[in-house]
């Protein structure tokens, strides 16, 4: 499933790993105490991440003067991203898929950066960098130290939590290579990028009517649920990219042409949707088929 961390040894790396563990523990304890957001209803048939177009969640809150971070622990989580992903999720789509697999409690309760932190815990455990039991123990120890410093001996010892993100996360789906589009050769890029140059011409052109059926197997996808099965029109062609549906599962790059597809809002959500409004969605070629002439 995941390749363990290999090829890294020596005192320097061990020191960096200890510092990373300590920072994860510190931020995890702070975030858990913060409880920045209330629990939202979980979707019935779609993943926690795929809420676009789903009713019942109310208006999207907007703060014109919203700061980048609402608390110091969010800033520290942002700073941890490079350290964690350099030791774990290096393939395109892999970190995002870790977030998609989170339990609804871990996805919603502490907001945007809270789910990042939960995803860090999952990846560090799955890559055998920091085990779930070791992390839970360190969090309890750090809280005990803080409680003792505050004179709250009545609250010590802190129970070691057994309800951690890495224990509640859904497993990685086993993607069947035969159900993915075939891989195709592409020159290796000279810099780190998801873009690829592929010889085959695009199947669709601007103005073509297309539709995206539902995926044939579970796992990571960039196809939002609200456009599945709905006809749209290609409005732009983007450079080809590696397919995250494949790379997130370590099934190769399988690069695809990318299209910007325009959807009429009332086609997506019915007559109650805004009239004469178009929603643009970037989609990989393997998601699309030609729409029927009368659609």
Image (cartoon, grey):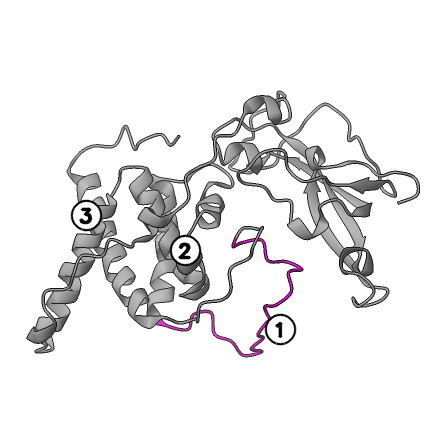
Task: Based on the picture, tell me whether residue 68 belongs to the magenta stretch.
Answer: yes
Left or right of 220? Residue 147 is left
Q: Nearer the viewer, mark 1 or mark 2?
A: 1
Sort mark 2 into few (<14), some (14-19) or many (20+) by Cα contacts within 10 Å. many
Q: Residue 59, labelled with which disc?
A: 1
Mark toward the start of the polypeptide (1 vs 3): 1
* Quarter of the rendering occupied by the N terminus: top left
Q: Residue 116, labelled with which disc?
A: 2
Residue 219 against residue 102 in the figure, above or below: above
> Which residue is more in the foreground, 69 or 161?
161
Q: Residue 205, labelled with which disc?
A: none
Sort mark 3 into few (<14), some (14-19) or many (20+) by Cα contacts within 10 Å. few
Residue 261 against residue 292 in the figure, above or below: below
- Label 1, label 2: how far apart the Cα atoms are: 23 Å
> Which residue is more in the foreground, 121 or 235?
121
Q: Name the residue under label 3.
A: 134
Q: Give the range drawn in magenta.
A: 48-71
Q: Dots 2 and 3: beta carbons under 8 Å?
A: no
In the rendered image, residue 36, in percent from the top left (x then y), is placed at 40, 72
Query: The residue tagged with tag 3: helix, strand or loop?
Result: helix
Task: Based on the picture, tell me whether residue 257 belongs to the magenta stretch.
Answer: no
């Amino acid at each position: 499933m995941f390749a363990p961390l290999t090829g890294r040894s020596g005192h320097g790396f061990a020191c960096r790993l200890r510092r990373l563990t300590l920072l994860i523990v510190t931020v995890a304890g702070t975030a858990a105490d913060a409880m920045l957001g209330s629990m939202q209803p979980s979707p019935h048939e779609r993943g926690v991440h795929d809420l676009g177009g789903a009713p019942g969640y109310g208006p999207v809150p907007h703060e014109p003067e919203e700061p980048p971070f609402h608390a110091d622990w969010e800033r520290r989580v942002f700073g941890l991203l490079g350290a964690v992903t350099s030791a774990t999720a290096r393939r395109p789509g892999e970190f995002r898929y870790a977030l998609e697999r989170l339990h609804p409690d871990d996805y919603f309760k502490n907001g945007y950066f809270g789910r990042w932190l939960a995803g860090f815990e999952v990846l560090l455990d799955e890559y055998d960098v920091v085990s779930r039991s070791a992390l839970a123990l360190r969090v309890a120890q750090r809280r005990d130290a803080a409680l003792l410093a505050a004179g709250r001996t009545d609250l010590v010892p802190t129970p070691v939590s057994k309800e951690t993100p890495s224990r509640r996360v859904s497993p990685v789906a086993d993607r069947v290579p035969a159900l993915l589009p075939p891989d195709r050769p592409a020159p290796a890029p000279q810099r780190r990028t998801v873009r690829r140059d592929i010889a085959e011409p695009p199947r669709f052109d601007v103005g073509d009517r297309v539709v995206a059926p539902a995926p044939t197997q579970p796992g990571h996808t960039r196809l939002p649920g609200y456009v599945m099965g709905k006809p749209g029109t290609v409005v732009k062609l983007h450079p080809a990219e590696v397919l995250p549906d494949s790379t997130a599962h370590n099934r190769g790059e399988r690069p695809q042409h990318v299209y910007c597809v325009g959807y009429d809002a009332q086609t997506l959500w019915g007559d109650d949707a805004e009239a004469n409004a178009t929603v643009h969605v970037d989609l990989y070629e393997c998601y699309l088929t030609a729409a029927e002439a009368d659609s």
